[in-house]
Amino acid sequence: MVKGLPSPLEYRNDLYYWPPNVAISPDTTNLFITMDGIDKVCFLNTGLQGGLEQISEISIIINGAKKDWNCFPYTTTILEARP
């Protein structure tokens, strides 16, 4: 579940950085971010493969540590399938 507003990443020297003024728990496994003007949802679980369109791996520096996240664009489109 996505809550709140996305945190805008800072891009410096070919790396993305978590904003220092935004608190984050060390055991966080998902993020809601804005990157290059696009809202994205990211998961730390590297086992996510397939099933999600436009997924990309992004390295983000958080509190000085680089972690790889699986991210995809966040949309509010709801699809409903009916018999």
Image (tube, grey):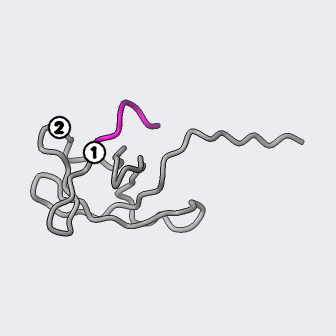
Q: Is residue 2 magenta?
A: yes
Asked if the stretch drawn in magenta spans residue 5, the answer is yes
Picture layout, residue 25 above or below residue 57? above
Residue 39 at x, y percent in the picture: 41, 46
Dot placed on the residue nearer the N-terminal end, 2 or 1: 1
Horizontal side, residue 27 vs residue 82: left or right:
left
> In this rendering, which labeled residue sits more in front, label 2 or label 1?
1
Q: Position of residue 83 (x, y in %)?
A: 90, 42
Tell me where residue 57 sits by quadrant: bottom left
The residue that label 1 is drawn on is 8
Does 46 sit above or below residue 24? below
Relative depth, front residue between 51 and 60: 60
Mark 1 neighbour class, 10 Å CA radius: few under 14, some 14 to 19, many 20 or more: some
By secondary structure, the bulk of the magenta-drawn segment is best described as loop
Residue annotated with mark 2: 23
Q: Which segment did they paint magenta?
A: 1-7
The amino acid at mark 1 is: Pro
Q: Residue at x 37, y 50 (%)?
A: 37
